[in-house]
Image: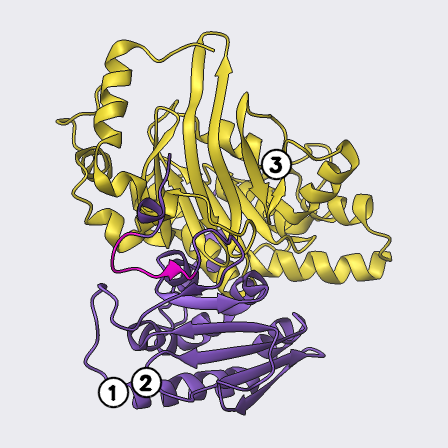
Chain colours: A purple, B yellow
Amino acid sequence: MTSVEDVYPPGHGTPEDPADPGAPRRATSGDDRPGTTADPREVWESVIDVFEQAADEPKIAEPIGRIGHDVLIRSLDVEGSGLLLVCRDARIEVRDVDGASADHTIEIALATPDLEKLAAGKSRTAMAIADGRATYDGPVRQFLRVLPLVQAMVNPPDAMGTNAEDIAQEIV
Amino acid sequence: MSTADPKTAALLDRASGYDYHQGPMTVPQRNPGDFWSIECIDLYKSFGSNRVMNGLNVGIPEGMITVVLGPSGTGKSVLLSHLIGLMFPDKGDILVHGESVPRMTQSRLLEMRRKFGILFQDGALFGSMNVYDNVAFPLRQHTDKSESEIRDIVMRRLDEVGLANGAETRTPSELSGGMKKRAGFARALVLEPEIVMFDEPDSGLDPVRTALLCQLIEKVHAENGGTYIVITHDIASAKRIGEYIAVLWKGRIVQSGDRDDMFGSPNPFVRQFLAGNPGGPLGME
């Protein structure tokens, strides 16, 4: 039989109450994953910049804005940090808020190394949650579904320049 | 239910003996559907005496490109059929967004399948229809959109896959293998599925066409988000597009995790397979 230790190895987040399947999972910033030397405050500011940029880009803001949730993103390393993304009516409104008290329907809290990846467009946030490095609350899956759009904005995939020419020349 | 032959059983036991085999990725989460798009829990499936799935556990994370990688004949396509309820396990459960597929009523199952877009190995295009009509088919079948709305959607999707340059009037027999895949991809996307599955997208393509198709998959995922599941045995494709990789062998997930972790795995089974090394625990059996 699988024990709690099997599911959540030492060093990873564990549910507050293993007997309660609905209990929120708590992550710790002192995770055993490779860390970062970056200043948590600077990383946090760069995350805010990324989402402000996304909000100004209609191609990205529209699909994210359709999820109809207020998403609160917090840094586990910056006290009081809170970035509220009001995703409604096919647009995103970005608000810098007190993370401890802001109303929200979805919450994700990440440690600085994962926030750094988020700001660089290299975050695998679902993995951070699965590994117990992130806290979440609410229907987070809906936000994770559209998060790749923000990530691709920061870190676009390889250019497709050769594809059109390639197709035109394909031999039938 | 049949049991695996002694040699296979011994190898599976050895593969399972590594601590990292049962890491947090292969264990169902506490709140079904919270952030796993799909969860497979202890799946068993046999065809006669041939056991194809042998206690398979895997979670497919939301919003990422997951590659299910494994040698030929190891149950990859059977797994895919289980995810959409075309086959049902002898034992175990499959949760799609937290909902049990084997327990769904027929009508719920049909509804659930609309979450999926699938690119089949050969594109599975209707030979009697041109590319445009093939891509428009799901919209005409499953929506009440007008022809002008359908045209907008179809042309946008064809443009996305690079087939809006006159190729829409061709029939499948006039298309190359790569173009058939692109047309199949466009058709898989028209209903805006939350989960897109690719069954061996590289089959029948040369390495350059495969790389271009992978590039296209990455690009379309970046523009649309969602969960993508790519089933393949092509390691280069897995390395290129897989953000999360699950290695399937003998009907069980030997190891799954982040791409970088997987390609640095100390597990000899995973290491041998990902390196394409003939020497190691994996043999021809």
Instruction: For residue B219, say whether it is visible.
Output: yes
Q: Amino acid at mark 1?
A: Asp
Was residue A15 drawn as part of the magenta stretch in this picture? yes
Q: Amino acid at mark 2?
A: Val
Q: How packed is label 3: few (under 14 Cα within 10 Å), some, or many (20 or more)?
A: many
Question: Can you identify the residue that label 3 sits on?
Answer: B84
**Circles 1, 3 touching at the beta carbon (< 8 Å):** no
Picture disc at residue A39: 1
**Circles 2, 3 touching at the beta carbon (< 8 Å):** no
Q: Secondary structure at mark 1?
A: loop
Residue A105 on image: x %, y %: 61, 73
Residue A81 on image: x %, y %: 42, 87
Was residue A61 drawn as part of the magenta stretch in this picture? no
On the same chain, marks 2 and 3? The answer is: no
Instruction: For residue A160, say whether it is visible.
Output: no
Picture disc at residue A43: 2
Q: How packed is label 2: few (under 14 Cα within 10 Å), some, or many (20 or more)?
A: many
Residue B275 on image: x %, y %: 19, 39
Q: Amino acid at mark 3?
A: Ile
Separation (CA) of disc 2 from disc 3: 41 Å
Residue B164 on image: x %, y %: 63, 58
